[in-house]
Image (tube, coloured by chain):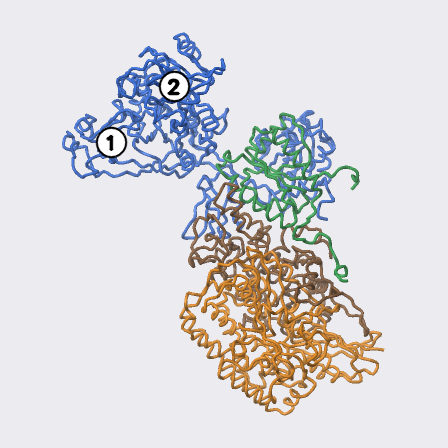
Chain colours: A blue, B orange, C brown, D green
Amino acid sequence: MEKKEKIGVYVCHCGTNIAGVVNVGEVSKWAEENLKDQGVVVSRDYKFMCSSLGQELIQKDIKEQGLTRVMVAACSPHLHEKTFRNACKGADMNPYLCELVSIREQDSWVHTDKVAATEKAKAIVSGGVARVAHHEALEPLRVPIHPATLVVGGGIAGIQAALEIADAGFHVYLVEREPSIGGHMAQFDKTFPTLDCSACILTPKMVDAGNHPNITLLTYSEVEKVDGYVGNFVATIRKRARSVVEKDCTGCGICWEKCPKKVVDDVFEVGMGTRKAVYVPFPQAVPKYPVIDRVNCTYYIKGTCKACEKFCPTNAIDFAQEDEIMNVEVGNIILATGYDLFDSRRIQQYGYGRLPNVFTSLEFERLSNAAGPTGGNIVLRDGKTVPKAVGIVHCVGSRDKNYNEYCSAICCMQSLKFAHLVEERTGAEVYNFYIDIRTPAKGYEEFYHRLLEEGTHFVRGKVAEISDATRLPGEDGKLIVQVEDTLTAVQLRVPLDMVILSAGLEPRAGSKEFAKTFGISCSADGWFIERHPKLDPVATMTEGIYIAGCVQGPKDIPASVAQGAAAAARVLGKIQQKEIALEPVRATVHEEQCSGCRICNNLCPFNAILFHEDRMVSEVNPALCQGCGTCVAGCPAGAISGTGFSNEQILSQIEGLLLVNLSKEAAAV
Amino acid sequence: MTQRITIDPITRLEGHGKIEIFLNDDGDVANTYFQIPELRGFERFVVGRPIEEMALLTNRICGVCPEAHHMAAAKAADAAYKVEVPRTGKMLRELLYMAFYATDHTTHFYALAGPDFIVGPDAPVAERNILGVIHKVGLEIGGKVIQMRKFGHTVVEMIGGRKVHPCTSIPGGLTKGITEEQRKEIEEMGRWAIEFAQFSLQAFNDIVLGNKTYLDLILGDIYTHQTYYMGMVDENNHTNFYDGKVRVVGPDGKELVKYAPNEYADHIAEHVEPWTYLKFPYMKKVGWKGFVDGADSGVYMATPLSRLNAADGLATPRAQEEYDKFYKTLGGKPVHQRLATHWARLIELLYAAERWVELATDPEITSPDYHAIPTATPTEGVGIVEAPRGTLTHHYWTDERGVVTKANLVVGTTNNYAPITMSIKKAASNLIKKGNVNEGLLNMVEMAFRAYDPCFGCATHSLPGQMPLEVTVRKADGEVLDVLKQFVD
Amino acid sequence: MSKPKFAMYWAASCGGCEIAVLNIHEKILDVDANFDVVFWPVAMDAKYKDVEAMEDGSILLTLFNGGIRNDENEHVAKLLRRKSQILVAFGSCANEGCVPGLANFSSIKDVVDTAFSTISTDNPNNIRPMTAYDMPEGTLHIPTMYPVLKTLDQVVDVDYYMPGCPPESHQIAAVIDLVIQVLQGKAELPPKGATIGAGGSTVCDECGRKRNVKTIKEFNRIQMIQPDPELCLLEQGIPCNGPATRSGCNSRCPSAGAQCIGCYGPAEGVVDYGARLVSAFGSVIDSDDPKEIDPILDGLVAPAGQFYRFNLAGSLLRAAKPAWKSGD
Amino acid sequence: MTEEKKPFEPTIVGFTCNWCSYRAADMAGTARMKYAPNVRLIRLMCSGRLDPTFVFKAFANGADAVLVSGCHPGDCHYVNQNYKMLRRFNLMRRVLGQMGIEPERLKLLWASAAEGAIFAAEINKFVEQVRELGPLNWNNKNGAAVETPVLQEAAV
């Protein structure tokens, strides 16, 4: 460095926390004597540097001794970096000219050998001094926040979040992949533990969302690309062609009445029922406009038919309609894209797909739903036979090393709900095959006891096999569940008419790619990672992007709603700030040195690096940059520098650390 | 008491050398030592590098003739991969090489050797340099020499990618070809080069052969040695610089051996002396008998003269005429007079220029078929070319990935280390009597080895370029009797 | 009045630098016109002794090429440092050791032993050259080789660095123009320690090949593929050092279809050349799976030799080696 | 130089990322877990910031070993930058090997913010391994110059 800095060194006792092991006085003295050429002009030790008195000590030196740099050796920067930066600020020194190194968490607390610990403290201090000499005055970046919000996923979590924000008076774009919002909850019959009708509580919210002046509902749409950064995202959304002109459609329903083409509904009815080629997924769908399923529509296959067009009273059918690509500007994004049901076919020994009367939980939801294919009659696949004995298998695809190790959280309660409904509507014998019963929430345990009283059988054991291979009398035409009752250690063969697989929850297919689109990270399982598992469960590592509902991990409706609301609250908080300050730890490309080799281009997960074909140079967008420094380390031309963690800072810190060498003979002398 | 004369460093040769001349009490020459003071050890540190890099690394052995190392290494790599370079690839390499040859021979004749003859061995030192040459034969020649160098380097860059240290030869051929426009340009430059070569021969003819004193000097005994002669030849025993077999003829002109590159180790061995970093190659069959002449001594030389001696002729018409004239004038084959090497060099210059045009006018020279992808597993390969300063041998062993595990280099000038040493001693003994040393005589000592155009940059991987000469004559007690200087510009 | 004095010298080099200087052709005359050339073995005669006789600092500009391989090289380097106001490390050898610096991978013993035990060497008594050897007529001396080859600034203080193996002639011409302009008061000298006669970026900056976001599934040897003549070589898996190598050569080798081998050394401000290539090549590998990464890396033969092909003598790690300190 | 009798105490430089491994170190501290005092940590924002120059510099300035530590694969605070470091890391080890430094002197450690105990244990293990290796001695499979032989030694 050309001009010599004046550095103050402050070594903290932290009561006895540090001084108990490290000879603080010696360290401070050593720094004063040995680090002169590095620019140390004053070095003090003090009981509690973080105390107001300690801070005043620093401020006094800055003023009186004209310090240009401050180096504090105390606790972890994660604890008090801000404290000391502010102290410097208080003395009109740029806060970023201060460095805090830890001689507590990384020294006094973890070592017992006082001599070694003191030596290490010296090394750490000398490293800090060498580093701080290369610090630069920095200003936090301030960016304005666009008041609109993008909510991806129209399930209960997304709806809740959208409504909270919209009600607060800010605009929301609610994007849903399916023709209607509602998500999985719309498929359910009853909700545990209260057993109130799912539709009854969900529909009003759907309608609100549909009519809300502050909500732009984008169903049958998907987010294809997200550019920008917190406060200033631009989302590219593909609004798929419905073949129905929304502004003209009244949702009268004539078109799907007249449509001659029946199609098995694999989505909403999970293959249990049918719909027309032009359809709304379910009666209470929001919005009410139908969609023409171009894959199955006769017109799109053969070029003839057009029945719907003929009969439409408002000429709302438009076969030529094309996908619409729209860009929306938003300040924050909430992801609530939910989950996929575990595919029970993967567990072959359970026979789903092969044995007709093995049902998945979602199939059963439709079966028991009054608006479902059987009008709520719980019957076998043949559509008429009422089962006399029904088994419910818990933890299908969950808590299982072969599939998913995690617990899907909702299956126990769901299974109990099923048990109740079966019992109530068919009077059949119900068997629950479980590993553990987990009912940790308000009213859940009570519900479990209610079931016990209703006389439902509970068999504790993991089902080995479900088959139609009958051996014993009375088994004819039955499904046989092979299971060991681990409480009695007896092998059981339970003959049943119907088996319900309480399948677990899995991340949406392609969630990893999806996460990439938004520049956030997934766990190994594929659930999106929150900023902090306890203290920040709805934020992500990417500023301005929040998660709610099952996208973050399996959870039930109340938890999803709570997260939706929580995410909304966080977004509202941000919007209220109008602008935010970003840490000025950023990468910068020095154009005259950049060769445009493009090696850095694939190093940034936040798409902060753009390449200018015209000038053949790469550039880092400072607001997009999160400051990880990977591109700085990656640039072969050394053309990228990183504030706060520059090469000079790190290299001199290394030199400083190694001034004190435990194995001198190993040093190159 | 003995006197010691130190010539350090030697002037006007590309490299670093030191001559120690010891006089006996009568002031006559007791012995002479020619020492090479440096070694860089390429054989060691190319180990561990992939074989395709040899042509790029060994380039750096010598910046005077990097093209020669580039070619020898590339050919060794071809051999290691057992890959046949497509005809166009071979021609492009040879074309680059001919342009280099013409440039190098020109530089040597006009800047280094020319002064001795054109200006005269006993002319004032201040005139015995390129400028002197220019005065003697006319100013325009200076421009022509520069032009020749420019043209040569232009072609080298067109095909080799760079003026110095070419980079395009890889196992199986080259990384690029040439366009028709480039071909035309190259052809024109080649035709100019032929004229230049003929002009040079004419100048040599008028000034040197026309002058009885010079002719006597050339034919005189001082510069005569009876040794073996080495040179590469094609299937018709015509001299070829880029490819062929190495032929060695004896002092009697009869063929001793004609070996393929991969057989070199059966025929060449290198003798070691503790007072120099350079080794002394000799014909293995004949054996090392010390620094002596004759059919029983394995000493051989590899220079333009030896190449002509080892061949039955030259493959291009004009050069062949000169070849015949050469032997007619000097009384038949083989020619033993070292100073005739300068003439031989000019004949090679003409051959190179003619071959240059031949190649540049071949219809296939612009074909895109300049590289064949190797398919065999590399093992071991030898590559030999004729460097201007002697036969250059590169030999590499590789593992199955083509990574060099061992290397051996027998480099141009090294071939001539023994004969040079002998020439120096003979010249010194003849020219220094009774401790009486004068500058002209010393220059004639230099002429003895300058004929070989030694490049110790190659030989030692040391310092090429010309070094000034200073001779200090000392008594044993170190008292300086006399200091002689000469200036080269 | 007398013209400022100019000198040029080579230590352990191949002479390519001298040839490159000669290749500036008529520009040479400018040198002659503006300088009094007092020491330039390739061009004119003058001895060490004459240089020793000069006043310290009496030479204005000295271009020094070649590495420091033996005591004689170091002696001349120190001599010229004393006599010169401006000492330029000229060419790769003086800057960073160049190819001869690869010898620093081996011990000097290995280097010498290898040279004197090749298959064609006839050396039954296993003789090695001696720095002093007694012959009947007297003792013969040759210089002592150092254990490692050093760069110029490892033995003397250097004012400017001019990279390249050899430096490109157009760059040499440009530098000579600059110096002449300075002499005429028309220009300023760059700050001490600056790199001259080269660009501030890397070879890709001057390379005409098309480039995309770089991701590589395997590295290729140049002779094993028929490369696309338009596309970036590295993107075709060819280990081209261009991204990390200082610009200034007009991307000679890549333009000729050959990979850059790095003769212009590190870019402006780079601490360690090889480290940049470790970053670069690590960065382009298109895999997050160690089981996949390693096979890809196997495609790079002896990476240290590639990353430090010209730079070993100047590298962080080698500069730290105890062996360095000897001879100082 | 007074510690002849004492066992060799290696000096190790450790690079940690701000989010996982540095917090793991903090965690070890708050939990008062004890480990060897030989490692000095440098905090980077992300292991992806690890420039090989840092590692080479550490060895050049006399470190006997270098520890590189980041978030577990998949848990990177910056999505997947620790993978990008991993690619460099493997290449770095190969280069060190040729440069005469045993690759074992460069250790990679994934540690989450919760893994203070693992962090402490791994450091102890590493310090022991380096003690085994002894001081950095530049010994080189390729036989690079460690001692400084003069030519006479080479002569017979």
Residue D32 or residue A476, whichever sits in front: A476
Within the image, what quadrant is residue A442 found in? Answer: top left
Q: Name the residue under label 2.
A: A471
* Label 2 residue SS: loop
Within the image, what quadrant is residue A606 found in? Answer: top left
* Label 1 residue SS: strand
Residue B462 or residue A140, whichever sits in front: B462
Q: Position of residue B115 (x, y in %)?
A: 62, 82
In the image, what residue occupies the spot 46% across and 62% down?
A: B372
Q: In this view, does A308 lie above or below C229?
A: above
Q: Mark 1 points at which residue?
A: A291
Task: Calculate the distance from the C-alpha at mark 2 to the C-alpha at mark 1.
Answer: 50 Å
Neighbour tally class for label 2: few under 14, some 14-19, many 20 plus, Cα within 10 Å: few
Q: In this view, does B27 lie to the left or right of A266?
A: right
**In this rendering, do the residues under marks 2 and 1 share a single chain?**
yes
The mark tally for this picture is 2
Q: In this view, does D46 lie above or below C277?
A: above
- Mark 2 or mark 1: whose residue is earlier in sequence: 1
Task: Give amino acid for label 2.
Answer: Arg
Neighbour tally class for label 1: few under 14, some 14-19, many 20 plus, Cα within 10 Å: many
Disc number lying in front (2 or 1) = 2
User: Disc 2: which chain?
Assistant: A
Answer yes or no: do the residues labelled 2 and 1 have beta carbons within 8 Å? Answer: no
Task: Give amino acid for label 1.
Answer: Val
Res. A338 in view:
no
Q: Where is residue B170 in the image (x, y as percent from the top left)?
A: 51, 62
